[in-house]
Amino acid sequence: MFAMLQLPFMVQALIAALITGAVLSYLGVHVVGRGIVFVDLALGQISSLGVAFAAFIGTGLTSIPLIFTLAGALLMSFINIRDKRLKQEAIIGILYAFASALTVLLISKTPHGDSDIQEVLFGNILSVSWSQISTLGIVFGVIILVHLAFFNRFFELTKSFENGENHLIGIFNIWNFLFYISIGLAIVFAVKINGVIPVFSFLIIPAVSAIMLTKNNLAVFIIALVISVLASFFGLSFSFHYDFPAGSSIVAILGVIFILASVYKMTSSIFVRRTPAA
């Protein structure tokens, strides 16, 4: 099980996965609580659109995806639906579909279109370098420090979304803006290494699974973190021992954990209903 740790590139991949999973699983609790699950896919796809556009014009492989993603995050922070017939997810979903179409159009004009699309979706974490890990650690470290310093502010805002009071935050709210910027920064650096699908999975699956397992708010954050760590290690181990793609293996392990959490949730609910009141 630990044989993979004897290979430097597997150690680097594991460290990158642990950093990515830990931060995204924390942010994912807020994303799920706000009911904006599509925000990750949309921002991830906008980041990929930036990569495709930079490759198309032959410059700005780092700066252009960052600009695209932060612009998308800024745009989404202003989305405040007042019409009860519409949901915020619908608008974000449209942005995701539009960004996906533009990305495919641009990538289709590159010399290695099919392989480029595969890398955009699932990344290539096994080729991550120490310099990329250092950059990832610095950016994600700053994001976590900001969220820890203003944890109550971010948590109260998420609670307002859960309680259906998000219409009270107004057109512009500095904490909502900072939340989307932090999500945007996390995604643009995570997608570059992991790909869109693993990033989406890290953001959503640990949070949803943790919510199924406990009602305690603090425990949800802790369990989500533990799930991301387990998925990172066992996903890469599965990839190493059975020669499967690393990104897909991590997503598959996250999916198994979600299924187990779902089974636990269903069986515990059945047990509670059948237990006679004292």
Image (spheres, rainbow, N blue to C red):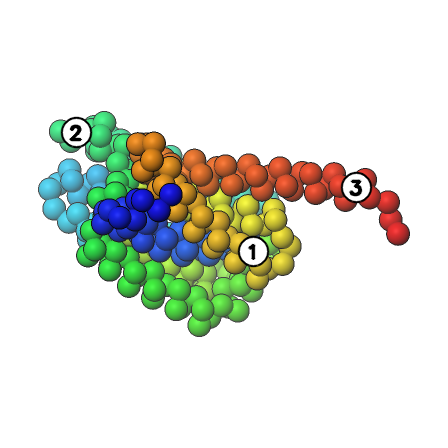
Q: Earlier in the sequence, mark 1 or mark 2?
A: 2
Q: Residues within 10 Å of mark 3 (few under 14, many from 20)?
A: few
Q: Position of residue 228 (x, y in %)?
A: 44, 50
Q: Residue at x 44, y 72 (%)?
A: 149
Res 19 quadrant in image: bottom left
Q: Nearer the viewer, residue 188 or 137?
A: 137
Q: Which residue is mark 2?
A: 112
Which residue sits at x=45%, y=48%?
230
Q: Residue furthest right?
A: 278
Residue 56 is drawn in which quadrant? Answer: top left
Query: Observer-nearest residue: 25 or 35?
Result: 25
The three-letter amino acid code for the residue at tag 3 is Arg
Q: Residue 72: which numbered mark, if any? A: none
* Residue 237 image point, x, y percent: 36, 41
Q: Nearer the viewer, residue 247 or 240?
A: 240
Q: Measure the C-alpha gap from mark 3 to mark 2.
A: 56 Å
Tell me where residue 159 appears, x and y as whole percent.
58, 59
Vertical position of residue 247 compared to residue 77: above or below: above
| Residue for badge 3 | 273
| Residue sitting at x 31%, y 41% | 195
Element at label 3: helix
- Label 2: element kind: loop
Rendered image quadrant of residue 174: bottom left
Tag nearer the camera, 1 or 2? 1
Q: Earlier in the sequence, mark 3 or mark 2?
A: 2
Residue 234 visible in the displayed image: yes
Q: Nearer the viewer, residue 262 or 234?
A: 234
**Can you say whether 245 is above or below 50 in the image?**
above
Cα separation between marks 1 and 2: 42 Å
Tell me the distance, in whole angstroms, between the alpha carbons under discs 3 and 1. 23 Å
